[in-house]
Amino acid sequence: MLFSDEVGLDVVKSKIGCLTEFLDIYLRIANVHTVDFYTKDVWNEFVAVSPETVISHLLSQQGGGSPEETGVSVWDQSQKLSDVAAYMRVTQDHSLPNLGVCTPLDDLRQEVWGDKQKDMFLKTSTFMNTKKSHEVEVMSEVIACVAKYCNIQQVIDIGSGKGYLSSYLSMQYGLNVYGIDSSSTNTNGANERNRKLKRYWKVYQRQKKPLNQDSAPEHLEEKQMHSVESFTYIREQIGFGREQESSPQTQSSHVQSPVQTPISAAFIESETNKTKEIDASAQIVGPLENECNGAENLFLELLSTDAVEMSSLSRQKKNLDEKEKERRKTASLEAKAKRIKEANLYSPLTLHVTSTTELRDIISDIKDSMMVGLHTCGDLASNTLRIFMTKPELKAVCSVGCCYHLLSEEFELLDDSEECCPGPWGFPMSRYLRGSVWRCGRNARMSACLPLERVTVGHGLPSESLFYRAVLQVIIKEHFGNGKTYTTLQRTNNHVGKIYSKSSSFVDYTRKSIEKLGMDSSKMSDSLIQGYYDRYMPRMKELEAFNLLKVALAPCIEGLILLDRLCYLKEQENIAWSALVQLFDPLKSPRCYAIIGMKK
């Protein structure tokens, strides 16, 4: 095996054990719900120092003491956090970057690509925002590396969304990609975007061709100007620098069945002649094509090889020998076949994927493939690995998950007297962690999504919206706390929704929220509501500081979730190599780790 597997199963199990021992103590901070921050007086229950002390240490990333010292000095005798520097040190020691289990991205690149420089003819920044461009460029390169090593040409993109990754893999690397997403809106948008990207691709390819040396300088300059104008036009159509939603008109005019049948090679070949005249006329009169090529060359490109030879232009070839004619004919046929293939490299499909999904039922021409997923939410990331393990046609996987709070957790609500349902569950996945019956909790999994790197460089968290919600809970408890409604709210996690951004003030926010929760606020005056805001505003720093304590734990909780998935792969007998790799810059994309695996 070309890839060395230095991080073995025993090492992964050891790190998981280390993390669970650590989190058994510290997870109580991560599992605090912000909603209950003031009603349960969380700050005074958990922390023995001032909010200013916590904020200054965490934002400056100041840790202190040795690991042995931090285990003792973090808490005082009443089990309140008393040493913030020690807390910072111990959380850093147990964060994923410091556990020594990640395979460096550069090592993975070097294994396959070596010193080869890839020709990036298609720049993602042309039609994606900065975050998505960074993610797609890096991940597509890794996928192409693994696919090349495994001799794979087919890729299945789970949770493909608008098709950014799928389109780029097909055009930049020539891979045959099926993008599967449960949302027909996303799939329709991906189809439309893919159509525009193909036009972009054609124009860009023609720009890269060397200009005719015999052309007059003024004609060359005119061609270049036309080409630039065409290129700019398509960039605007695609949506440079932003992610576009498909319009309602587009969605309604592209109604799709629940499963779209992929286009087979035979169908493409049979339909080519039917559509040739339509495509030819559209391209001949279209401004983009005319600007990029002369009318004569374009006409020749659209005609079949036989038609070209039968035309009056054949007189120009009468002096060519038979060998040269045959060579040109073969080259023309190969170019045409390549164009047909390239036009259908990416196929968006609409389907809800589960761990029991049969790929052969939706992809008729499936062959040895690689399964990938860029920021697949919740259980979809776990199911991606399960599908990979159970389907023999899948030879490799590259999965980047997100939305850990949406994971189904096997032991989350398990009491001593209860038996757990069979699943399959999103967490834990490995036999090792499941055997310990370890629980994380939804609030802790939500804490795992907090972006530590972004917070520490000044991006911060939406403190005011969280503050509004925590104070609202005090109002609900004091004015509606004895009724049946409040009991129901406690059981259903008090979902208010995104009302903060639609509110002009705390009073407006409170009235809208209480109305949404089905309660009557008419007996509460504006001054009464404002009084709650004024009372707790001096304590807003407590909420901000406590959330920073949760942010510091985020890499530790995320590390446990990802190591559990890595352990799951390493426990399988038919896995030849698996690794956890940081793909992205966490400042640009906080969910930056990929699980990569290859079968024997």
Image (tube, rainbow, N blue to C red):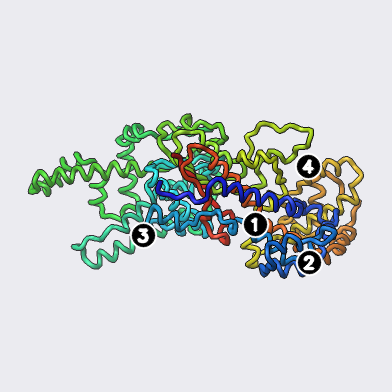
Q: Are marks 4 and 2 in contact (CB under 8 Å)?
A: no
Front of the two marks 3 and 2 = 3
How far apart marks 3 and 2 lie (CA) works out to 51 Å
Q: How far apart are the alpha carbons under marks 4 and 1?
A: 33 Å
Q: Which disc, if any, is residue 115?
A: 3
Front in this rendered view, residue 506 or 389: 389
Q: x%, y% of residue 14?
A: 61, 49
Q: Residue at x 47, y 45 (%)?
A: 577
Q: Earlier in the sequence, mark 3 or mark 4?
A: 3
How many residues crowd mark 4 within 10 Å: few (<14), some (14–19), many (20+)?
few
x then y, percent, for residue 525? 90, 56
Identify which residue, 178 or 444, lies in the foreground.
444
| Image x and y of residue 75, in percent | 79, 61
Circle nearer the viewer, 4 or 2: 2
Q: Amino acid at mark 1?
A: His
Mark toward the start of the polypeptide (4 vs 2): 2
The residue under label 2 is which amino acid type? Pro
The residue that mark 1 highlights is 94
Say left or right for 329 vs 61.
left
**Residue 59 is at least partly visible in this image:** no
Name the residue carrying label 4: 492
Name the one closer to the observer, 597 or 339.
597
Upstream in sequence: badge 1 or badge 3: 1
Report if residue 589 is visible in the image. yes
Q: Which mark is residue 51?
A: 2
Specify the quadrant that holds the C terminus. top left
At a point 46% along the width and 33% down the height, the residue shown is: 392
Q: Position of residue 568 (x, y in %)?
A: 57, 41
Residue reaching furthest to the top: 361
Mark nearer the viewer, 1 or 3: 1
- Residue at image position (83%, 52%) is 473
